[in-house]
Amino acid sequence: MSEPAEFVTIKLNGEEIQAPAGEMLIKVAEDNGTYIPRFCWHPRMKPVGLCRMCLVEVETPRGTALVPSCVQPVADGMAVETGSPVALKAQEGVLEFLLVNHPLDCPICDRGGECPLQDQVMSYGPGESRFVEEKRHYEKPVPISDLVLLDRERCILCARCTRFSDEIAGDPLIEFQNRGNGTEIFTFPDEPFASYFSGNTVQICPVGALTAAPYRFRARPWDLLTIESTSPFHTEGSRITVHASQNQVLRFLGVDNGLTNQGWLSDKERFGFEFIGSPDRLKMPMIREDGEFREASWGEAIGLVAARLKEIVERSGPDAVGAIGGAQGTNEDAYALSKFMRVAVGTNNLDAQLDDGLNPDFLVGVGSRARIQDLESAKTILVWSADLKEENPILYLRVRRAARELDATLIVVHPARTGLDDLADHKFGYRPGDGADLLADLAAGTQDYAPALDALQDGPVVVILGRTGLSEDGGLAEAVASFARDLPAASIMPIVRRANTFGALDMGVAPSLLPGRIPARGASGAIIELWGKVPATRGLDTAGMLAGLVGGELEALIMVGADPVRDVPSGSKAADALRAADFSVAIDLFMTDSAAMADVVLPAEGFTEKEGTVTNLEGRVQKVNRIVPGPGQARPDWSVLDGIAESMGSPIGLPSSEAIAKEISTVATAYEGVSWDLLEGEAREGAVVPIGDVRQPLEYIAVNAEQPARTKGLALHLARTLYDDGSAIRHSLSLAKLAPGMTAGLSPDQAVDLGVEAGDLVTVSIGSVTFACPVRIDRALADKTVAIPFNQPGIETLDAAASVLVKAGGSS
Amino acid sequence: MTDTARWSEESEALAESVMAKYPQKRSALMPLLYIAMREDGYLSEAGMRRVADLVDLEPAQVSSVASFYTMYKLEPVGKYLVSVCTSISCWLLGGDEVLEAVEASAGVPSGETDESGVISPEHVECIGACGGAPAVQVNYELIEGLTPKKATELVEWLNAAQPATLNGDEMQALFGGERSFDWAINETNDATGPYPAFQPHGTIAALDRS
Amino acid sequence: MTDHPLILTARMHAHPESSHTIATYEATGGYTALRTALDMGRDAIVEEVKAANLRGRGGAGFPAGVKWGFLAPARPAYLVVNGDESEPGTFKDRQLMERDPHQLVEGTIISSLANEVNHAFIYIRGEYPKSARRVQAAVDEAYAAGYLGANILDSGYDLELTVHLGGGAYICGEETALLNSLEGRRGEPRLKPPFFPAVRGLYMAPTIVNNIETLSNIPWIINNGGNAYSAIGPEDSPGRRMCSISGHVNRPGNYEIVEGITWRELIYDVAGGIRNGNELKAWVPGGASAPWFVPAEHLDTEVTKAAIDSNGSMTGSGAVIVMDHTTDMVAAAERLVRFFAHESCGLCTPCREGTTWLDMILRRMLAGHGRASDPDVLYDVSDNISPGVTWPPKMTTICPLGPSAVSPVASLLKHFPEEVAAAVERGTQVPVSIGIRS
Ligand SMILES: Cc1cc2nc3c(=O)[nH]c(=O)nc-3n(C[C@H](O)[C@H](O)[C@H](O)COP(=O)(O)O)c2cc1C
Ligand code: SF4
Ligand code: SF4
Ligand code: FES
Ligand code: FES
């Protein structure tokens, strides 16, 4: 918590400077243009002062002393020499000590060329080695997880990786082992460094001791092109740099946007880059003919799509067409989809969420919105959402930090065990379906809930809410929001997980909204002036569209970066719907399970191949950039949609991504002034599109509505895992194998009732789908509940609403 | 935390009582490691997993602590751990020669265990018996004032007699010489394995409180 | 020597068979100091200890009463008694624990009372199971007798006392490493600042760490008054202290001395002189970390804190290691350096790498592969651990262990350059490397 900084005056190398009291000397020096060499210090971790590289001379009452500047807070009147002979000798000495056991294999080291140790040696280091004894030897790189390799000979024992894993990620799986000169970093036998955040240690390792399997030896740093961009994987909008060589994206690195990811990435967003260069990417338009796909030209494909859509609109009206998707692309793509559906087709049947999110009006319209940064000053945090570790890993890190480092009181409500449970001051579980009862108890502060309710009176409070699982009604989150609204100094952060969902909703890819969070019904203003009349009736959402296809009210479906067969919580219904469709077209990167059922499949450009903007879960708009061309004839979504509209004879007039951006900032009132120039200039950390502001036309008042009746038999908790069988992961070879696979989570008592133990096989039936899988014991689960991970490889997607049965035994 | 294999009821009860002696249960980590050693004769992976479970840590954190200290043996050792001091005061009076004698009669170098799994010689730093140098410990029971010859006899005796429990006073009387100070009366204890015999950690049955 | 009564070892000399039992302890005035202290109250106890000018016996020699005065006001506070005694040459705390454990327990209870502590710990090195057994037995007896536990002697004062056994690591004698160890962590020292035990110690609470011997003095001080204690011996380092003498002397052992005698008296009278009538070559005056003394310069100087300090060494743990003329001083230095290299916790670079490097050079010299550059490299590596190679040492390290390894090297280079030169001479000048990890 930042109190108003008091300033002190210190003398840095003879010059008087002002610095905030208590700030570490190393930081003060750096802010004033003096770089003190360092290895263990990292601005996002607590200083430990152990490498001793940053020694400087400080004047004390008892003469000058050598002090490590990374653990020395500045004090008034302090006189510091960072480059005195004594300080330099000490620094050179430390460097020599580090090199004593460091192999001289820079030419074959992944870090060569961007190694702080190498750099230090160049600028300070001793010349010839005086060390004639034998160096420490260890087995050369050993894999410590599926993603990370460790070369202990190169390690300089700075403890950055161990501190990150323990303090920041909460996965203390790599630790110092042994002591003294035999100290090494290692895992426990048979306990790999299986952390969702392991890649960060590779990035912060100051030498080449930790390397990433997905990019070892792929390229030398000096061959790399680099751009800054925004990660497309989570709704938090992590800032990254993209590195490419010879039109191949080779890696992503985290960038320290202090307001969002603070430099960290989940492994999914760090290593998910692999899908971009996948050989399976679609390269040519494909048309189904006699049941088989054949390649086609863009002209032919677009002509066919336009003709079929036009025919259906003319025959059955515009509401016979629907579109799902749009959350995987840029805001510009989403805007094009929104405009295409309203203007070229004439319907509100469009939905960026795949039946797994929340009411769009609520998501973009609920007032008192929290920003991620509010977690820094929160006294109490209530998380009643999906397991953040699985779905919103960056938010997970920020909540962890708030609870662990900033002493916020953490309350977690979730039916199963979550990654935050260990840090939570209060954890409440419930049987899926019983959430409303729990909310009533919490609001009333009955016995067990009284301390938590007390904590919630201690503001500022940040309430993070979302659907805890796919089998939960979205109305519960709204009920929690209505409770939270009455807490003192509370702000609310409704969340969903899929990439640019918030951007797509802001662009009006929702049955009820136009760009700029304008309700479609009764819209007026700039947007109507430009778009003309738009349909006023609320359109169908994804579930409605899928049902409509089966029922015949809907005849054509456009899928934009959407794979309903894998992604909606009742995949078999989606497949039925696609089979029933008169016409369907998929604009996608891959031949997904859904695309494979379409009539036309159009190859899209993906992340790193196009320029635009995205909006994160707090309304922060950031730029994404292009560094490689798309494969084959792939085109950006907006351009495909513009082409179809043109061919339908109802042009939407979108000539370029940048032109769309300008159009957005004129018609979407909330996006006024958010230009690419701004985002690349002074708003490098992104510009937050205000929510609940005067320019926010929609104010959604959440209510505590009646919840659906609870399940009688076994309750199903169907929840996502970070790694699953989604298309980006399926095509990122390093990650694909990390999906945990099917398990049946049971409470200990439930397991006893069934006569099974952890690891035993059980047979699970969910609706029409039956499979065998091992039991996992989850002590946080209520009895009469089974927890099933969603979208695992090899298993059909499951219907969250179906009834579930579990019995002991089974064969896999 | 995963469920790990429980120890004997006696050890589990000891673990409970040890944890209760500290304001925070992580503080019981080191005593628990000794209990784990008593269970398996050394500090096994399973033992560390059990300790991790008891104090809510990851196994890597437990091995990080265990491997820091020299007395937690992460590999199996013989029935008798014979620790020979080779630090300065013992060295001045022939500690190296005592070590050589122990290694020779055990037939294996320091750090290893003889074929029959009886003797594990090791050289250690000062064991606080410098006034009675050279000094040796067998399963942490002290003998002071050894000579190479007496050291050889000690190893031979251990091999031949293979006592189930060791008594420092008895060994001192048989093989020792000059002591750092008078130890006062003999007392019964049972050093039963290569870990210190200290009751709260479960290694001795009872103290003679005469 | 002097006619002052023995303070620490009186009982064990008088009752060699039973000095460790509560019966003998009580029969010889034991636990009367506790009763007195309970009546005196906290501040009066601290005043007595301050008046005694009782210096810490763990190595740093800081006055105990002053240390207690620094205890931060937050509660709970803890007292941790440092029984990790592991510095080569030192075996005095072992005798105090094994032979008079109740004296320690009573001292601990009184010190806890003085510092408003309700939970104290005695941390005993793992290689001392016998000490731990004796102390634990004494603790059990004290609980049974009502000297420990809830409402001690009906005073309303509560104290839990836990005996903790270490796992084999000299560095845990360093007080902050000891606290980490007691928290179930690696015995790595903490940074001071900000982790001064008196403010942020065990579990980040205010904590007093005192040595076994230091606290064993407390009952006597309470019984006889601080002034009686400070009247013994030199003003600056009064009282009696345990001196462990080992090495090439005729009568090694622990001696409870009063400072002020000369080294000649200590070595030749108290410890019986050098074995076989050999010549004295050098001695370590205060534990393995202390710079060496040599007869020509130091034999007739005083054994007082002030004199030892001004002669460029320290009282340290009070251990005196005596070496006769047969000693190979390069080898002796190597033995000492090897110890510190083995015991380095490995946290900070200069100590982790530097101590091992020093040891490697010395071993190579001893193996007959000395190089002409070795003396310079030895000095410069020392300088990079302890800038200036001065006394008291400066350090590039986190704790004083690293610089401790410099003491023997600096002493060797200073007092025995000809032996270093001879070792270099023996060298073949063929560059070799020998692996010496063990
Ligand atoms: C490397 C190192 C080892 C130490 N070892 C011991 C020890 O074994 N026993 C001890 O009492 N103090 C030891 N000390 C000193 C302690 O840090 C601490 O100063 C002492 O326990 C305080 O007690 P005292 O004030 O009563 O002397 C050591 C210090 C250092 C730097
Ligand atoms: S692996 Fe890298 S980050 Fe970890 S301690 Fe070694 S050098 Fe530091
Ligand atoms: S000086 Fe040595 S023992 Fe002390 S902290 Fe540094 S590495 Fe550890
Ligand atoms: S950067 Fe300061 S000690 Fe490592
Ligand atoms: S030097 Fe061997 S016991 Fe101290």
Image (cartoon, coloured by chain):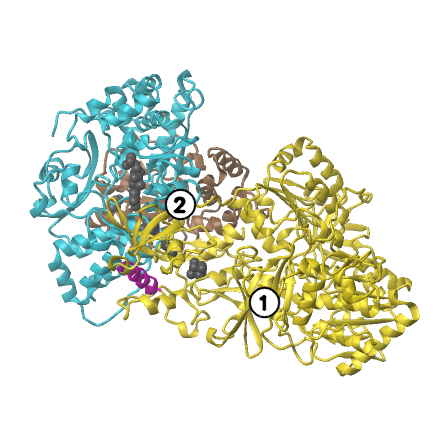
Chain colours: A yellow, B brown, C cyan
Q: Position of residue A180 (x, y in %)?
A: 35, 54
Q: Estimate the spatial distance between the alpha carbons at disc 1 and disc 2, rounded to whole Å.
A: 71 Å
x then y, percent, for residue C151? 44, 19
Q: Secondary structure at mark 1?
A: helix
Give the magenta-colored segment's residue range.
A89-101
Q: In this orientation, which residue lies closer to the viewer: A735 or C149?
A: A735
**Eyeballing the image, is A729 above or below B44?**
below
Whether residue A268 appears in this view of the structure is yes
- Name the spot of residue A529 as percent of width and height, x first: 78, 64
Label 2 belongs to which residue?
B194
Question: Which chain does the numbered disc 1 sit on?
Answer: A
Query: According to the image, label 1 marks what residue?
Result: A677
Please state the chain letter of the residue tagged with numbered disc 2 in the rendered image: B
- Looking at the rendered structure, the secondary structure element under dot 2 is loop
Is residue C245 placed above or below A266 in the rendered structure? above
- Comparing A689 with C332, the one in front is A689
Image: C11 above or below A137: above
Left or right placement of residue A428 versus residue C272 in this view = right
Residue located at (14% from left, 46% from top): C293
